[in-house]
Amino acid sequence: MRQNRIRWLLLVGLLLLAPITVFNRFFLRFASDLPGDASEGALALWHLWWPPFGFHQSDGLTIHAFNGTPFLENHLLAMPILQSYMYRLFALTQNPILAFNLTLLATVIATLIGVFLFLRSQHIPDVLAGLGAFALATSTWYTGQIDQANLIGASLWLLPLALLAWNAWLARPSLWRAVLVVIALYAGILSGVQALGWISAIWLPYAVWTGQRLWRRMPGEESRQPLSESERDGLSLIVLLFIILFFIYPGPVIVRTLQGNEAAYASTIPALPPELRSFLGEIRRSGPAIWLAAMGALFLARPDRRAIFWLALGGVLFLMGTFLLPDPLRMIAGALALPYQPFYPTTLFLGLTLFALIVFACLAWEDAWDRVIAGRFELPAAAGIALVLVAANYPMLRGPQSTPVPVYPFYASIAPEPEDYLL
């Protein structure tokens, strides 16, 4: 009983320590500063505020002239529709700066919990799963999203949620669980079209790999069993519902973007700086401690078939993140001779690589953790590993860069006016 209490205290401590470490002294400026430089923070706040307001306007939600009159602008790549309703809840504080930062904080906490729950679903010990979630949240790549006020990039919690929803349907197929899979996937797209990257590069390969018993004969079986009625109906419902929702949004906007009439806002994805165009540079700037844990697991632990899948997937994702392989949507567009527009920065795949390597390392070290560390060594081991993870990303200790937002009396004087106009 005492060991269980200590274990849960360790877990809660890790989940609380991560956002404290990530935001650091910025917590003291939550009500007055935006993360990122002046343009990053301002644009992120505007795009977070817009969807609930924009739904009631005559202009389109993503292609409109509301903030660039008289010219149409395509805001597809910067539109966090799902997070905007979380922001609307926090906006009850009557402080938009505080509401933005609380939304960002909630996103970090949701990512921690989501990664932890997925790792736990793989039968990984609680504290080890907590360390895996802590490793992702404090990695150089993830804290870089916070540093740039990139709320869409930081919303990685929907990836483990979609994986969990698929696992739940696979364990007991039903129509309701199939609907939950679609909700999780579509919520990812509503959080930002960049989610198409992890849907095609992680969720889909994982669904095919774990669901292989549904469409091919397994070793030891004399013949493949036909799909049950619930499995057939569930798969059909997942595909059909997702296609219908996709053609409602963002399908039409993507078509207009590919036609070239209105280029997507910030559509020019910057190339990596020259110093990042190397394997060592990418490893150092994404999450060196995670890479070290994964490489140690490869050579010192005994990874099973499940772990090897995640290692192989992480390797492919890393090649995509370093431009050595095209991303999935580019390959599909090339195969179908369709025009292509990058809907996500290539650095997204470096973050997905870290996620895959964390799952691999936790699976590979699971047996050693249970046999050697679990019990009396758990507290010092967890504390030491957390310290190494923080030290590996020492620039994070200063907290994210931030920009004070001046509030002029003029704003208060025009706020009661009924008209909507752009300043």
Image: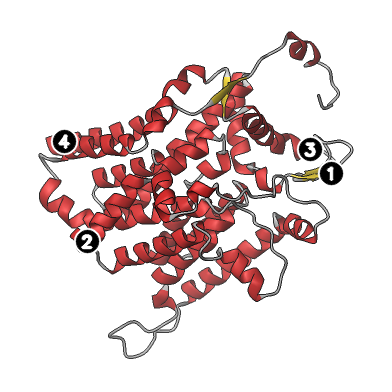
Q: Secondary structure at mark 2?
A: helix
In this view of the protein, which residue sits in the foreground, 73 or 163?
Answer: 73
Q: CA distance from mark 4 to mark 1?
A: 57 Å
Amino acid at pointer 4: Pro
Task: Name the residue that disc number 3 marks.
Answer: 56
In this view of the protein, which residue sits in the foreground, 400 or 416?
Answer: 400
Task: Name the residue that disc number 1 marks.
Answer: 72
Task: Name the residue that disc number 4 marks.
Answer: 380
Whether residue 1 can be seen here: no
Amino acid at pointer 1: Leu
Task: Kindly identify the residue that appears in the image at 30 percent across and 63 percent down.
Answer: 307
Where is residue 355 drawn, in percent x and y? 40, 52
**Closer to the eye: label 1 or 3:** 1
Q: CA distance from mark 3 to mark 4?
A: 55 Å
For residue 326, the mark is none
**Closer to the eye: label 2 or 4:** 2
Q: Residue furthest bottom?
A: 222
Query: Which quarter shows the N terminus?
Result: top left
Q: Earlier in the sequence, mark 3 or mark 4?
A: 3
Q: Is residue 266 left or right of residue 279?
A: right
Q: Is residue 383 above or below residue 330?
A: above
Q: CA distance from mark 2 to mark 4?
A: 24 Å
Task: Name the residue that disc number 2 marks.
Answer: 299
Whether residue 339 can be seen here: yes
Q: CA distance from mark 3 to mark 2?
A: 57 Å
Task: Kindly identify the residue that appears in the image at 50 percent across and 56 percent down.
Answer: 321
